[in-house]
Image (tube, helix red, strand yellow):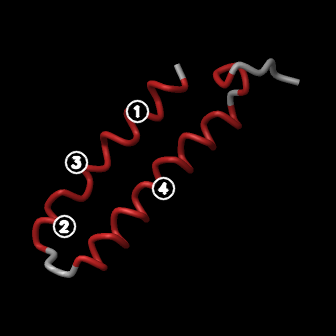
Amino acid sequence: MVARMVRDAMFNIADRIASELAAETDQFEIHRLLTIEIRRALGTALNMMRSAPALAGHPAR
């Protein structure tokens, strides 16, 4: 379940920023935008795991 959430979050990056990246010519700006979106996707997945410990394989306390 967790792996699916992380996978979906990562695949959704392309949908969110494809047009912005297509218009960008500066490789450093592309890198910055990708880094922001990857961190956002992984942060969202982490927050979901923290809010539902059973999904991460840990029983709720």
Image coords of residue 19 (percent x, y): 14, 61
Marked residue nearer the N-terminal end (4 or 2):
2
The residue tagged with tag 3: helix, strand or loop?
Answer: helix
Kindly identify which numbered label has been placed on residue 20.
2
Residue shown at 47% from the left, 30% from the top: 5
Q: Residues within 10 Å of mark 2 (few under 14, many from 20)?
A: few
Could you tell me if the residues under marks 1 and 4 are in contact, i.e. CB atoms within 8 Å?
no
Towards the viewer: 38 or 59: 38
Marked residue nearer the N-terminal end (1 or 4):
1
The residue tagged with tag 2: helix, strand or loop?
Answer: helix
Q: CA distance from mark 1 to mark 4?
A: 13 Å
Q: Is residue 35 above or below residue 50?
A: below
Point out the image quarter for the C terminus.
top right
Residue occupied by mark 4: 40
Q: Is residue 17 above or below residue 27?
A: above
Residue occupying the far right of the picture: 61
Horizontal side, residue 45 vs residue 24: left or right: right
Residue shown at 70% from the left, 19% from the top: 57
Kind of residue sitting beneath label 1: Arg
Could you tell me if the residues under marks 4 and 2 are in contact, i.e. CB atoms within 8 Å?
no
